[in-house]
Image (spheres, rainbow, N blue to C red):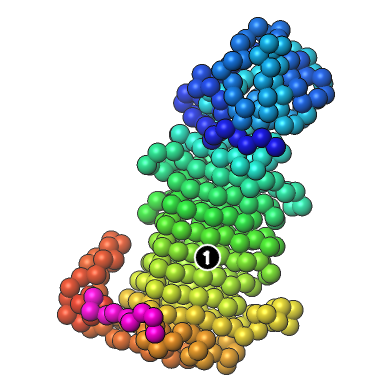
Amino acid sequence: MTSPNGPILFNSTTGSDSAASGLGPSVALIGSSAELDGTSTVDMSYDGVSLSSISVGDLLFCDTTSGRKFSVIASIDTINETITTDDTWGTESGVSWAVGGKRSTFDHADSRLLFTSDAKAGFTIITESDQDLTSAILRGPYGTSYPYITLGGSGSTLKTLTATGNFNCITQAQNNSMLVYNLKFVGSAGNTSRGFDGGRAAIIKCQFGDDGAATNHRTAVASSVYSGGIQVRNTAMYGQGASVSSGMGVHSTYYAAKGVSVFDCLIKDFYYGVYSNTNGFQLTRCIIQNATIGTRGNNAFGVDSCIFSSISSDAIVAVKTTYDEQWPIYQTGTVVFTRNIFCDVGGNVFNGSNTTSAFSETELGYGDYVTCYLYNASGFTGITFPSVTLTADPFIDATNSDFNLNTSAGGGAVLRSTNYTLGE
């Protein structure tokens, strides 16, 4: 198979869904009289267009009446004016075609094929503009597998995907995977949907909703399919408020899934910051703010170097899974709980009242690494962790999400003076 020559570009202002393929010459070559004979070679000679500016690895778009619409170009015959692609086509005459330029909208029926049946391993789809969706980008249904692709926004500012109704922005079925970066996911007011749901994915430098906005998704990221697994990094997730009982920043639901790993993220205004039904999760260097419950896990999970702020109930809840008999690997209920800061927690710092008695210090960490710091926070049920009680708020302005450490005695000064000896 031929490697794509670059990213497939979209621009809803300057692009075209009828006269561009998204990958090739910056100004699209177009025609209206392509001949398809059931092979991988397409005859453009009736249009009399020079093909000399086309390169191997560019993308051909043929506006066929059914079946395939896109294929990567494997070779060009500039004398006979034919293009050979990686894939075969149907049999059809007088077909409009294009190579290059920029496509317009993800929402177009033809463009959606680039995410599914016409997708190829190595596809990178980049939008230079915001995109509105009238239904979810669906990489499915169940039992259908598509190649791994990359989806992103161009430039230094996030490009917005807006679900204009009550549906997910992106839904992946089992065994589908993708990398997503530099995008913002927005829903509709009062929605009960998810920004990103299912499959295997890496979500990097994205944003879900806006701080305090009515159009935020009920759930930001969900891993809800068998054999899923999602990693989220450097991403802000904003919800509909801590009072919305089913709102979740990250939701990991399916047993035997790989769960969710979250690094360096802000999770704000959800009932649950992270919720796992039957599989584990890892939460590292994250801030969970204004949640009823910070995290709730039914199996092994980790919470390391995180900040919990303005949690009205429990910060961390460990619950024995009901699937222990079916999935013995999860029976131990191991919890990794290290170096966290708790500020203004109304319930327990740690609530393990429903877990087994299998917890031990070796399962939690080692030495000073299990120490947590408490300001206006207390309560350990099931096991007590080593802790330091702060006498002053350690943050510059937690209410406005400024979690830089202040220099107050008994607060930020204590944390600033803390250090660990590495290598022991």
Left or right of 49 in this view: 82: right
Q: Position of residue 44 (x, y in %)?
A: 70, 13
Is 114 or 365 nearer to us in this picture? 365
From the image, which quarter does the C terminus lie in? bottom left
Q: How many marks?
A: 1
Rendered view: 269 above or below 189: below
Residue at 26% x, 66% y is: 404
- At horizontal 45% and vertical 46% (from top left) the residue drawn is 182
- At x 51% / y 37%, what residue is drawn? 126
Q: In this view of the protein, can residue 2 be seen by the observer?
A: yes
- Magenta part, dominant SS: loop
Instruction: Specify start and end residues of the magenta stretch as a single range.
Output: 416-424
Q: Nearer the viewer, residue 30 or 270?
A: 30
Examine the rendered structure and indicate whether residue 174 appears above or below residue 320: above
Residue 298's x, y, as percent? 59, 77
Residue 8 locus on image (x, y percent): 55, 33
Give the left or right position of residue 82, taking residue 170 as reference. Answer: right
Secondary element at image label 1? strand
Q: Amino acid at mark 1?
A: Ser
| Label 1 packing within 10 angstroms: few (<14), some (14-19), many (20+) | many
Q: Does residue 356 show up magenta in the picture?
A: no
Q: Which residue is mark 1?
A: 261
